[in-house]
Amino acid sequence: MATAWGRAKRALANKLCILVPERQRAIEDGSPGREASPRPSAASVPEEKVKSPSVSLRRLSMSSSGSRSSKRVCAICLGGMRTGHGQALFTAECSHKFHFQCISSNVRHGNHICPICRAEWKELPFQGTQPADATHGRARVSPVNWAQDDGHMAVIRRLNHSYSWNLHDHFPVFRTPEADIFNDDEHIDLQSETVDNYDAVTGSVEIKTYTEFQAIQESVTQKVFAILIHLKALKSSDSVDSRAPLDLVTVLDVSGSMKGTKLALLKSAMSFVIQTLGPNDRLSVIAFSSTARRLFPLRRMTLIGRQQALQAVNSLVDGGGTNIADGLKKGAKVIEHRRLKNPVCSIILLSDGQDTYTVPSPNAVRPTHSLLVPPSILPGTGNHVQIHTFGFGADHDSAAMHSVAETSSGTFSFIENEGSIQNGFAQCIGGLLSVVVKEMQLGIECVDEGVVLTSIKSGSYTSQIDEDERNGSVDIGDLYADEERGFLITLCVPAAEGQTVLIKPSCTYQDTTMTENNQLYGEEVSIQRPAYCVDCKMSPEVEREWHRVQAMEDMSAARAAAEEGAFSQAVLILEGRKRILEIQAAHSSDSQCLALITEIQDMQERVENRRRYEESGRAFMLAGLSSHSWQRATARGDSTELTTQIHTYQTPSMVDMLQRSQTLMPSVAGMLNRSSPIVPSFSSSRPVRPTKSFSDQLASSGSSFQK
């Protein structure tokens, strides 16, 4: 009875950091005859050991001379600390010893002072996997048969009290606070021959227009008359390999839920990205869990740069929570503080969980999800970059990831199958490595009197119509090589005789090598005004675009219904649109209609009930809406076959890169059995180039989303 009471009393004393004399311990244990080992008090510790800012930890010897008594008791668990039993012991700066397991658990719960003398420690014991590049001090622990540098036991130096600690999450462990300014990006040699070769690429734009009808009866005022303005970015270069260099920042989730195969496949996907980038492309990697850290600054992907990047990526370990906001904050800092800038820049964000650290202010003006995006890289700032987000698995916050992408003018992709991470990255990289046009803006000017703009169907692109309704514009931004955009505008056309000149389109843009704007004017769009119109058929191009726009609107309506729990209504909305498209496809056998039918049918199956919608329906629909609203390819669900993604605005460069990814794709079974890091071999410093034969075959087959 006395022993139980003594142990309970001492446990309470340890919790409150109260010193219990050794003699009193022996009495309460009911063993007055046992001689307790004397414990050094705080006063007996040499002053220089307590006040020294850098006190090394004593190495624990397994011989009897390493401690004053083999019967010493750990003040936390009250168990003996005897040598020669394979126990890891920790000697603090104040000279008190504890079981390493006990004191590291004590520290994890927020106790940063000695349980015996209450001395505040500058170096803390930590149990967990630490980064490979850590250079902080280690506990000098040498138990029997244990490695000298065991990766699961370390000592971390306490940071400034102003720094927020969360040791319970275990990752990442910082030895010192990171710098406030990331201006250490690797230098770009603008005079090198290689850069000149890459900068040789130039882009041009093609403008085509299609009117809804070729003519309108002269006596008729057409209140809604549609015109399709079709833009295509063309690549003009003497060298097929020339392109604009890229600055890429990848923000990767390495929280505890990314353990096992997920993390292995993420490393494989990043290895593919690193291997694909060229010597003038620069890469920086941000890893985040409970907090974020930059693995390395923007670094050129030369042979040495790629090898170092691979080593850093392969050193990643999982653990902790999910702090997306901190990851994006550091990624934005890399972009904002660059000394030199490559012509193309983007951020890729991948996460499989929900942000558990961002709490919006009660007076926040911006929506909750948009708070994740740092204001310094939003559109309208000098550092604006697109964030292409990848939601991974069934547990990610697809609404937040979609909002981050939408706010930054990027795309959201849904990676349902863990084996598809590399394919998703490959498709995105294929586009980023082929940017030929930047900062494009479409202008629309009405010509004849009485003709006014009534609407611009621009999806997620920012558009506006002037107060006089005679001019309008659409901000488009970047275009990849051979990428197309279609914008459906509606006009009010007054009655007139002979001919009516409707609009004159134009666009301004920069190619990837020039800073001044290029101006391009399209031909004036006019229609005939006969006394009578006979057999006027709608333009197939305009009709196809109307179906696409209306399908996108129905997808959005179905998603809104599903969010309110009206799943049967969501199914009916999609079913109605599918029937209309089936009728259209029966008459024209249009490939776009067939693709939309397949996509809508897949959405229907995923919104049948709440379980299906929350598992994959929401993410699948948001990825589809992101694709259609930006008219840019996104990954959706677990579809990885090239034939299923032809309709998703893919460019030849994307298709080629996706084909290469599928050829090099590691099997999931291989990931499960893999014990060594994923390090592809490089035969030279040349970047991976997609083959041209596949895209040529694709073009020759006539497969295209927009014609």
Image (tube, rainbow, N blue to C red):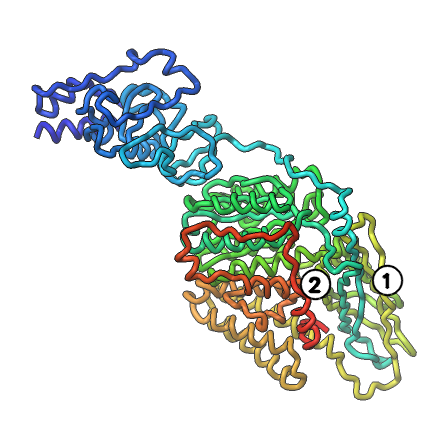
The answer to whether residue 341 is above or below residue 404 is above
Query: In the displayed structure, would residue 572 be above or below residue 293?
Result: below
Residue at the outermost front position: 683
Where is residue 490? Give x, y as percent: 76, 69
Write the residue at 67% across / 63% down: 653
Disc 2, SS: loop
Q: Earlier in the sequence, mark 1 or mark 2?
A: 2
Q: Amino acid at mark 2?
A: Ser
Q: How far across and how far down the image is residue 152, in percent?
A: 36, 38
Number of the label disc, if any, that sits on residue 188: none
| Label 1 neighbour load within 10 Å: few <14, some 14-19, many 20+ | some
- Quarter of the image for residue 117 reads top left
- Under circle 1, the secondary element is strand
Q: Residues within 10 Å of mark 2 (few under 14, many from 20)?
A: many
Q: Amino acid at mark 1?
A: Tyr
Which is more toward the observer, 404 or 213?
404
Name the disc covering residue 521, or none.
Answer: 1
Q: Is residue 474 left or right of residue 51?
A: right
**Image point 57% across, 32% down: which residue?**
179
Task: From the image, tell me which residue sits under label 2.
Answer: 458
Please give left or right for residue 379 compared with residue 147 in the image: right
Quarter of the rendering containing residue 597: bottom right
Residue 76 image point, x, y percent? 24, 29
